[in-house]
Image (spheres, rainbow, N blue to C red):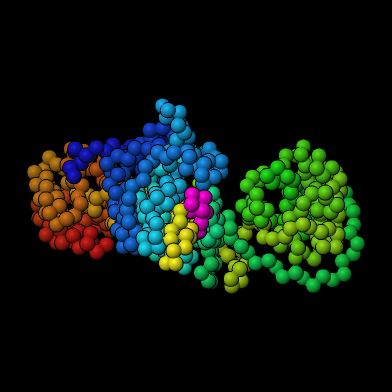
Amino acid sequence: MRQSHFFVQTLREVPAEAEVPSHRLMLRAGMIRQVVSGVYTYLPLGYRVLRKIEAIVREEMDRAGAQELLLPAVQPASLWQESGRWEDYGKELLRFEDRHERLLVLGPTHEEVITDLVRNEVRSYRQLPVTLYQIQTKFRDEVRPRFGVMRAREFIMKDAYSFDVDWEGLDRSYQAMYRAYERVFRRCGLEFRAVQADPGAIGGEGGSHEFMVLSEVGEDSILVCPHCEYAANVERAEARVPAPQAAARVPEKDRFLTPGAKTIEDLRIQYGLEPEMIIKVLIYRADGRPVAAVVRGDHEVNEIKLRRLLGVRQLELADEQAVRALTGTGFGSVGPMDLGIERVVDDAVAAMPEGIAGGNEPDVHYRHVVPGRDFQWEKQGDIRTARAGDLCVRCGTALEEYRGIEVGHVFKLGTKYSEALSASFLDEQGIQRTVIMGCYGIGVSRLVAAAVEQHHDDKGIIWPMAIAPFHVHILPVSVKDSGQRNTAEALYDRLTEAGVEALLDDRDERPGVKFNDADLMGMPIQVIVGKRVADGMVEIKWRRTGDVELLPVEDAIGRVTAAVRNP
Ligand code: ATP
Ligand code: MG
């Protein structure tokens, strides 16, 4: 590609709306432009990267035995009503009407449509197992689209769905996808971790893993054990509970006044009470009914765990007025004793030998409160958010915390959709059975941003060879110099013939402009054709290290070709 004709416009200014490096760099390099909030056009430079990633995904899906198809973006509401997600999915699901006033949705995901297909096509166990996939545009009306294509409303996903006759089959299909995902992300040149995940809105009874690209700007927090294999999204990470200490005789509970203290922090500053000694109570509304979540003062309630333990859909914190009405006191002095509300106690609280708790009257606390002696509870479990320093549930080592960008997600769905939509088959005995499903997503367009996040410096992008828009950027310093121009053209022809994708900067621009644009756009190799061409020499600059080598033209061709073939 000759840059003089290439549809690309780099930006010198840093776009004000872009908060993270990948968004800034993708705009500045001329890869993407926003059309409306969370909806983007991929310009040729950006689209080349997207297509390379798609090609890798496709190869690995095919290698794993999955078959590609293409489902529609528009889906009938009736299928979502059948699965129950018409109610459950919320406002992210874009709903609209056609001219016949029939309700439709723009697909945020395709479990319903694919299950409908399979229930109509599959009759017998002989047609199973099968894994089907597509690479397609999704629409989710995200509350807060941000970070460019990282969290967009319209984005490109690879979604795959497996159909098996039994759970052992699902395990095999899941493993095959899991391994394919590892290969995809490795080939894209990314540093990633597979972590245990919360099944979330897609639901399902089986296991689930997320693939996280490690990055400071990631929206997810993950806890990783440095000793064993354990790694989990903080949404679901478990942490070992301290063994209950053999309680020495604890004195009677003892009332004391704490005027002015509304928070755990106030109690620490004003009364010198350590947060880990405090028994904290938060009042929630769970599907309408009040529930008291009881955790240690230095712990946070994990609402995902709490919701799962309670088996409810809706969970929200009660406001202070509601708390007053329910407990007789405001924030700061609510406690677990004599509370006429269902109590859910975290394991770490149950293990406390004694603690300090609110007295359910304004400005009153009690010390020497013993869980089990001074108050009881209706439910107990792990309802707190694990954090760095907590002990690994498998091996007891202190966990480390990282930020990650979720680029892939694999789920064992089981029969959630096949049951709701009656997707069944006849087994060898002629007995009708429900299909066992798995689903597997890769955020193809998010991957582009994640790759930039991991591979850039203050000058611009540094593409891994496998997903670079071009392998090499040829930069004649002055196109007015016929020696330089001719050598650059010859290099371009020779490399192109050898199967190397080259971008030739044939623009009549100042050298500084060309070098800056080349560093910004980030091709892994630059070939600089300058004055030394008079002696038949050109420079190769490796974008990642900045190393420059002066070589005869022939050797440069050999070096570049070899580097592209064996990156
Ligand atoms: P998130 O928690 O980031 O919203 P999700 O759990 O909703 O993701 P899935 O439904 O599992 O995501 O979708 C599969 C993949 O699609 C995700 O792993 C992610 O890489 C990608 N993805 C999801 N939402 C978006 C989005 N708004 N923009 C870009 N990619 C997305
Ligand atoms: Mg989401």
When asked about the image quadrant of residue 563, the answer is bottom left
Query: Quadrant location of the N terminus?
Result: top left
Residue at 16 percent across and 50 percent down: it is 529
Residue at 37 percent across and 63 percent down: it is 126
Residue at 43 percent across and 48 percent down: it is 116
Farthest residue to the top: give it: 99
Measuring from the top left, give residue 357's x and y in whole percent: 81, 54
Q: Nearer the viewer, residue 433 or 162?
A: 433
Q: Nearer the viewer, residue 554 or 550?
A: 554
Measuring from the top left, give residue 437's x and y in whole percent: 46, 58
Query: Quadrant location of the C terminus?
Result: bottom left
When asked about the image quadrant of residue 187, the answer is bottom left
Residue stretch in magenta: 414-422
In the displayed structure, does residue 528 sit left or right of residue 392?
left
Measuring from the top left, give residue 22's x and y in whole percent: 40, 46
Q: Is residue 91 visible?
A: yes
Measuring from the top left, give residue 476's x and y in whole percent: 17, 46
The verdict on residue 415 being magenta is yes
Q: Is residue 216 visible?
A: no
The verdict on residue 25 being magenta is no
In the displayed structure, does residue 518 sit left or right of residue 444?
left
In the depicted structure, whether residue 31 falls above or below residue 199:
above
Residue at 53 percent across and 61 percent down: it is 206
In the displayed structure, does residue 289 sit left or right of residue 495?
right
In the displayed structure, does residue 511 sit left or right of residue 332?
left
The tally of labels here is 0
